[in-house]
Amino acid sequence: MADFFDIELRFFNALKKRNICVWYQPQVDMRTGSPRGAEALVRWKREDGGFMEPACFVPVLERLGIIERLDEEVLRIVCQDIRETKQRQISFGPVAVNLSRLHANRAGKAEHFKEIIEKYGVQMEEVSFEITETAEKYAGNKVMTEFADCMQERGFRIAMDDYGMGGSALRLLQESHFDILKLDRHFVSRIGDPRTDIILDSTITMASRLGLEVVAEGVETREQIQFLLRHQCFLGQGYYYSRPLDRERYIRWRKAAVQAHHP
């Protein structure tokens, strides 16, 4: 527990010093290669100038029950980046922000997120939220359904993240009206395996019939893109297009991508 308390103290110190950073992984229309937005990915800047990966601190912050402070800081940074970029007359694109499972158990969270967005003058369509499928395991199916519905009532688009990696995906899809389904990189990386191909084909077809937009994570090869396009999945993110980028590099990537497809 000593290490946990040490990380807790360092985390609140990092918040004060603004050492929590957001990088952006572009999302792309795979039919054309044109940019469609980005997913916000958190980074913790160390004292030596390097960055700590989320896997090193997110599970600890969840165990300590303070992961919500991290999510709110990420949302604040995203809104600030969108506002400042618009002030420079540059299009930033919509950004997807990840939410911890713990938010579902807190009353008034949807309204609080809306207040943060409005404070920065950001439009509702400029931010969406991703809730991991496995969140249902911890929050309870009814609680997750009510939370997702509450977020949508306030105008937010909601994605089910890491689809296929939990245990109650179909039930959650049945009871919650998500807008977006994200195919986990575990399945995308195994495209070409006959069983995986069948699973992805049926999942994309099901999502389409439910009216969900489908986004593939972890796209790394042309063969994966061709498979996904053949099966009517048009949006993707991954190293084939770009690694996560800090704000200024993301802006440069986005401007170059827009110019390449709209000269």
Image (spheres, helix red, strand yellow):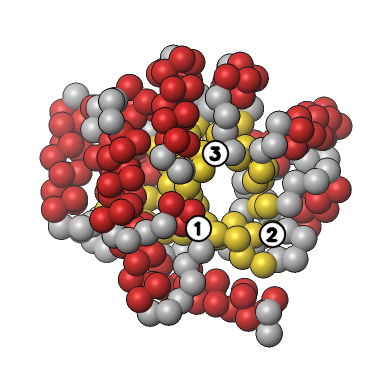
Q: Amino acid at mark 2?
A: Asp
Pick whichever, 241 or 56, lies toward us: 241
Residue at the spot of label 2:
29
Secondary element at tag 3: strand
Q: Amino acid at mark 1?
A: Pro
Q: Count of labels shown?
A: 3
Q: Nearer the viewer, mark 1 or mark 2?
A: 1
Determine crowd level at label 1: few under 14, some 14-19, many 20+ residues with C-alpha closer than 10 A.
Answer: some
Task: Determine whether label 1 and label 2 are within 8 Å by CB.
Answer: no
Q: Is residue 15 left or right of residue 124?
A: left
The C terminus sits in image quarter? bottom right
Q: In whole angstroms, how far apart are the C-alphas of marks 1 and 2? A: 13 Å
Q: Which mark is residue 159?
A: 3
Q: Which mark is residue 94?
A: 1
Pick whichever, 17 or 178, lies toward us: 178
Query: Where in the figure is residue 241, as x and y percent of width and height?
Result: 64, 62
Query: Where in the figure is residue 183, as x and y percent of width and height?
Result: 65, 38
Q: Amino acid at mark 3?
A: Ala
Determine crowd level at label 3: few under 14, some 14-19, many 20+ residues with C-alpha closer than 10 A.
Answer: many
Q: In whole angstroms, how far apart are the C-alphas of marks 3 and 2? A: 17 Å
Residue occupying the point 47% across, 47% down: 128
Vertical order, 1 against 201 (above or below): above
Query: Where in the figure is residue 56, as x and y percent of width and height?
Result: 35, 40
The N terminus sits in image quarter? top left
Determine crowd level at label 2: few under 14, some 14-19, many 20+ residues with C-alpha closer than 10 A.
Answer: some
User: Counting residues from the N terminus, which is met first, the one under dot 1 or under dot 2?
Assistant: 2
Task: Determine whether label 3 and label 1 are within 8 Å by CB.
Answer: no
Vertical order, 261 against 180 (above or below): below
> Which residue extends farthest bottom?
263
Pick whichever, 244 or 163, lies toward us: 163
User: Counting residues from the N terminus, which is met first, the one under dot 3 or under dot 1?
Assistant: 1
Q: Is residue 100 visible?
A: yes
